[in-house]
Amino acid sequence: MDKLLNEDVTKQVKEYLNPMQDHVTMVLFTQEDPCNTCQETRQLLSEVAALSEKITYVEKDLKKDAALAEEYGVTMTPSFVMLDKNDAYQGVKFNGIPAGHEINSFLSALMDMSGIDFGLASTIGSRLDNLEKPVNIKVFVTLSCPHCPGAVSNAHRLAMSHPHIESEMIEAQTFGELSQKYNVSGVPKIVINDTHELVGNQPIQEYLKTIEAL
Amino acid sequence: MFDFAVESQSEQSIFDSQKHFDFAVIGGGPAGMNAALYAVRKGLSVAVFSLEIGGQLHNTSEVDNYIGIEHTTGGKLSEAFHHHVLELGVPIKTGHLVSRLEKKDDFHITLDNGETYTAQTVLYATGGAPRKLGVPGEAEFANKGVSYCTTCDAPFFKNEHVIVAGGGNSAAESVVDLAAWASKITVVHRSQWRADQIILDQFKSIDGLEINLETQILEILGDTKMRGVRVLDKPSGEERIIEADGMFVEIGNIPKSELLNGLVDLNERGEVIVTPNQETSLEGLYAAGDVTTQPYKQIIISASEGAVAALAATQYLMHHKK
């Protein structure tokens, strides 16, 4: 089969991931046909995993491994989560293939999860110290949207910064029905706890304000 | 098949130790990137501050008018600019908006997270934000059918009928981009085409394209989402409704000059008034690109203005360097 990442992109990705610190595991959930983009997502993850010895890639079946899927809150396919060096789930999830511009939020999440400081500690300060309720951040994207990776990275970094926050990228075309349910016709669209919405690549301050207002 | 647009990453740790720069650039589009390139090559200490890299260039799908590059995409050209500047070691702070710019002895640049940096000279190159139609229903149906980014949102209108509002190059390019998705495209523009003929020539191969010139949009209609627009046919004076599933508004940009209100002279449109050397009315502060009074909003013009600003700032620092 042809590779998804051509020679130039392979080189770029390899260089990008070179500074990774600790080990990261990607757990992909798929299911037997019909599964739109399962095959491509599987191929992307295995090609990227092959470019760094610090990445492990495992594949699970949504039905056969239902208990694990439930642990990570995975309900759709293709969907993958990233685990840190202790195999702990930090609330970082991708639903659909992170191709096109979205490769950037994927690579950035790998770097962040490996322990590279993403410099949010001073911005967040003590603002999330009193957060007790669970926060779910959905970021709807299209693969042709240049502003979307920034929105996804912000959400994922918040998830990595607090145990009660989880964040998921949702590729709007693969999950068309879900996108319709949330009235998505412009991206990035950020939905927090199904009740609060932000549109566009917002600075982290806007996420924090919205979370504080929940 | 999928493609992959990997963007270079800037080393952020330098911002922990260095808080002062000779030349600070606010904005990550063509003007800001080219200014950073010219300034660092002159030996200035340079930093760039921008929420994201690319500016409006990032929203452009095809670029066919940058001399020497016969065909590329906005994303690729933007990444090439970015990579070039990073290779020269310029630190770029992304993910944060500049929330305040003040001049004390030096310029003070405050980010939305409270961090402050200082610089002896500053280039303000924040570009523009999409201009809105300013008609009833626009705010209500924004992102519920009404979009300002064709490359981002075209996939939501597969096999649907969309309106493109506008008559310049970005509107014409929007039509070409949407042809791959929409089943029907209706252009509505209040006057005549201003787009390049070479883009309009591509319309011949687009099925289901209807063009309404001298037609003004009066209102956006809908329920839970946009369903159509009410328009005025200017020659006949008659009003009618055009039903559609979505609309892309491509009627130019408004300058993002809000941080300069009260700091420098702006014209009645909010554009920064500059000299031929890109100087603003405040000493040491330069402006370049779409935020200025320069009427032709083009990638190459913004880039070239950025270079002029960097060279002018270099000259200024030679006489005023502390």
Image (cartoon, rainbow, N blue to C red):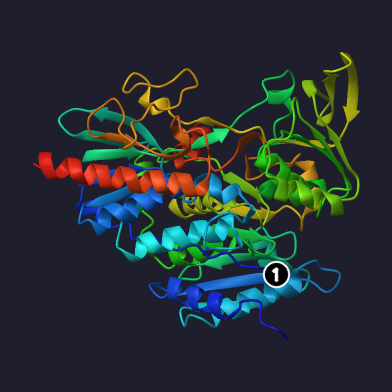
Q: Is residue B128 left or right of residue A37?
A: left
Task: Identify the residue shown where x is 35% and y is 53%.
Answer: B92
Between B271 and B192, the one lying in front of the other is: B192
Q: Is residue B117 visible to the viewer in this orientation of the structure?
A: no
Write down the residue under mark 1. Answer: A29
Task: Identify the residue shown where x is 66% and y is 42%.
Answer: B169
Residue B166 spot, x, y in % from top left: 71, 33
Q: Is residue B85 left or right of residue A24?
A: left
> Residue at the bottom extreme?
A1
Task: Identify the residue shown where x is 69% and y is 71%.
Answer: A41
- Residue B312's image quarter? top left
Q: Quarter of the image for the N terminus of chain A: give it.
A: bottom right
> Residue at the top extreme?
B237
Between A181 and A126, the one lying in front of the other is: A181
Residue B302 spot, x, y in % from top left: 45, 44
The chain to which mark 1 is attached is A
Amino acid type, residue under disc 1 in the picture: Phe
B258 up-or-down from A175: above or below = above
At mark 1, the secondary structure is strand
Q: Is residue A69 left or right of residue B309?
A: right
B210 up-or-down from B280: above or below = below
> How many numbered tags mark residues here?
1
Between A43 and A89, the one lying in front of the other is: A43
Residue A151 spot, x, y in % from top left: 55, 48
A149 up-or-down from B275: above or below = below
Q: Is residue A109 visible to the viewer in this orientation of the structure?
A: yes
- Residue A193's image quarter? top right
